Amino acid sequence: MSSKNGFPILTPQEAVAHIPHGAMVAFSGFANAGAPGAVPEELALHARKVHERGEPFTIRVLSGASCGSAVDESLAQAGAISWRAPYQSSPSLRNQINRQEVEYVDMHLSHLGRTVTSGFFGKVDLAIVEASEITSDGRVYLTTSIGATPTFLKCAEKVIIEINDYHSRRLREMTDIAILSARPHRDPIPICAPMTRLGSTFALVDPKKVIGVVQTSRPDPINPFGAPDSFSHRIAEHITRFIFDEMRAGRIPQEFLPLQAGTGRVLNGLLSALGENPYIPPLKMFTLVVQEALIELIEHGQVISASATSLALPSHVLERVYANMNFFVPRMLLRPQEVSNSPGVIRKLGVIAINQAVEIDIYGNVNSSHLFGTDILNGVGGSGEFIRNSYLPIMVCPSIAKGGRISSIVPMTPHVDSNEHSVKIVATEQGVADLRGLGPMQRARAIIDTCAHPMYRDYLNRYIENARVGHIRHDLRNCYELHRNYARFGSMLPDLDFSEPSML
């Protein structure tokens, strides 16, 4: 058998032979970047063959965050996942979770490392990790994401490395990997600026645990975001104006503060708007994911640095980065998610955090993960850590969906990911509600008058007027009437004529 740096070179089929039914398998990857491809795809084929023989085959799946089509989607389509944590974005897996066919643990991403090392999930049987190189003494140079991979390499009983030569070996120059010390003697994380370095350019693994390496050459399966729509443009205008007003009032220093933004079309467009505004200084990012909009802003000098845990870029954008590494290497840093999402670091840096909601209630409670309180979309991800601990947490969403048949501002959210105590700013295409210093009724009036779509304002105002008086006014018989209406009639307000252009 041939070898690479002393480790056996395996075919994907040979690698899969080491994965038994019921195993806990940890995969590298975060936001669909840096995940293995060849082994999980072969594992899906293996699961299908086993099922055709009438035998069971499923595994428990861990990762840093979403792992894309090669891991989550291919394994879900093969019926090979029994349990998943802490985040996913696969259509097939999502449907299986919502049918209770797969057990899903949705959790804050900064908690994952300590949960694994403490053994709360049980033994990690195998880690399958994408890297650009592994040395004979166990240095593992990761590719486009760090996520929780250093922890998986430390804790897994056995390890398989996919060496993907598609990626630039110079990615290691952007990498800053530090494993935090054990409690109760953990030192504070000494990050004083977004680009402060803590650790090394590689993760470590005990060479004795490495079963072998699988050689591949393939890009990350990441699709470009669509162009921002009219809702996104108006939200961006409101947020940009609000932030500029905060600077003029002295609540944001003239040198500005580090910025975090979630992923998606709305937030991609918002980043572009902030970067292009001549009155806002060049941005420093302390975030989770370097996404497409950031690359152009870095190229134009509108973002001067970006610290994250994942470089989640479509292949044509990533190749642009690889062709100009002398420029990008000093401006980007990839670290473990236990650091990128650390509540202490977020507070210390005074991060401005901008994240997207599914719906927001009139008091500021946010649902960012479930439809109608029951069906998971992707998960809470890292948003909760930034919302709870940032200097200025901003939640955004369009005020309506489905052509107006759904209001994103509701009396009570049937699922809560971030509560009213953490949410300070709410923005839709209608405007920005500043909730700082407001009591419950003042918050409700501000959100209804500023953020709700006009077609829903009368209903929401009547709701609080008719609700039982208390510190927080609610009508427990009717607080989910809008959701019940949509389930029954296909519209939250079935009496409205949505064919009337003035309604939108």
Image (spheres, helix red, strand yellow):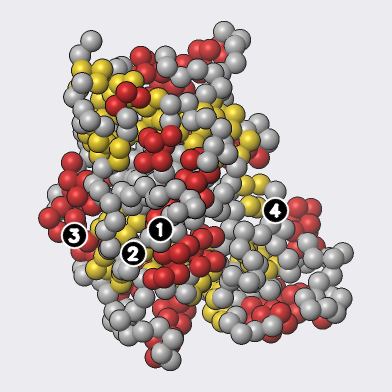
- Which residue is identified by label 2? 191
Of the two numbered discs 2 and 3 on the same chain, state the one appearing first in sequence: 2
At which x and y percent is residue 17? 42, 14
Q: Circle 4 sits in a helix, a strand or a loop, which is it?
A: loop
Q: Quadrant of the C terminus?
A: bottom right
Residue placed at 26% from the left, 32% from the top? 138
Of the two numbered discs 4 and 1 on the same chain, state the one appearing first in sequence: 1
Q: Quadrant of residue 301?
A: bottom left
Q: Is residue 35 above or below residue 273?
A: above
Circle 4: residue type: Gly
Task: Find the distance from the CA under tag 3 to the CA under tag 4.
Answer: 43 Å
**In front: label 3 or label 4:** 3
Q: Circle 2 sits in a helix, a strand or a loop, which is it?
A: loop
- Relative placement, left or right, of 237 versus 205 is right
Kindly check if marks 3 and 4 are in contact, taking CB atoms under 8 A apart as contact: no
Q: Which mark is residue 187?
A: 1
Comparing 341 with 35, the one in front is 341
Residue placed at 25% from the left, 25% from the top? 215
- Which residue is identified by label 4? 373
Task: Find the distance from the CA under tag 2 to the CA under tag 4.
Answer: 37 Å
- Which residue is identified by label 3? 330
Comparing 152 with 330, the one in front is 152
Circle 3: residue type: Pro
